Amino acid sequence: MSFRVFPYEPVEVFPTQLGLIVLQSDETVEQDFRRLFGPEVELQFTRIRSGADVTPETLAAMEGDLGASAELLCPWTRFAAVGYGCTSGTAQIGRAQVAALVSGGAQTRAVTEPVSALLAACAALGVRRIAFLSPYLAEVSDRICKVLAEGGVETPLFGSFNVSTEAKVARIAPASIIAAAERLVEPGGVDALFMSCTNLRTLGIIDDLETRLSMPVLSSNLVLAWHMARLSDVALAPGTPGRLARL
């Protein structure tokens, strides 16, 4: 048997590289990101251990694994941005600590997560008061609301499905989310609706809700993708729902 060595030319230019750290228990955000970005972007995903029950303790525990999860992204890829896909986890760990741990594990120009992304989206839309819809127990969601208030965004209307187990979140029917959103914003006095949690299946109902509610509708996955696109100077895919995507 003969062995031959062939010359090759290296590829010098790659599409924009984005990385995302996904919770072990998340069934939704990867699918949404594939819809939200076009072919000019290449996505890399890694996973982080997360508890089956969503509590302040299980969320805070992810801090110990966040850097190692970022290291599992391709080590020689230079990312334009890396996202941490957990709204409530970010609120527990802290935005600055998330950024430090992720940037310590991956080569990236920028780090973001749904909390910073939501604050940036609200600033871009001129939103100061939001109706906050969450799948989780009050003790988990309260922490997010406090962090948002520190960033200048008030949450005078708060509603929840009061779910404690992650396995149920992706199985909340879109019709139930629509019904809850309409009831939540009924008192008025808010500028937008925010649907929290990267595992909640909301992407397909954003346009419908904006028509029903006559206000911007935001979700964890939408704001995170929008912020990563903005930080990376790339566009979201055509047809991305929501007023935010049309800015």
Image (tube, helix red, strand yellow):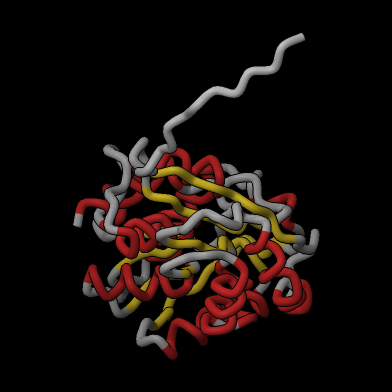
Q: How many marks?
A: 0
The spot of residue 235 in percent (x, y) is: 27, 49
Q: Is residue 104 above or below residue 12?
A: below
The spot of residue 142 in percent (x, y) is: 58, 81
Closest to the observer, 188 or 49: 49
- The residue sitting at 49% across, 68% down in the picture is 113
Q: Is residue 91 above or below residue 193?
A: below
Residue 217 shows in the view: no
What quarter of the picture does the N terminus occupy?
top right
Left or right for 231, reference 42:
left
The spot of residue 155 in percent (x, y) is: 43, 79
- Residue farthest bottom in this picture: 150
The spot of residue 215 in percent (x, y) is: 26, 60
Q: Is residue 97 above or below residue 2?
A: below
- Residue farthest top in this picture: 1
- The residue sitting at 72% across, 78% down in the picture is 60
Left or right for 5, reference 39:
right
- The residue sitting at 80% across, 59% down in the picture is 52
Residue 159 shows in the view: yes
Closest to the observer, 95 or 199: 95
- The residue sitting at 72% across, 11% down in the picture is 2
Left or right for 237, reference 55:
left
What quarter of the picture does the C terminus occupy?
bottom left
Closest to the observer, 139 or 79: 79
- Tell me which corner region of the image, top left, top right, bottom left or bottom right, holds residue 73: bottom right
- Tell me which corner region of the image, top left, top right, bottom left or bottom right, holds residue 219: bottom left
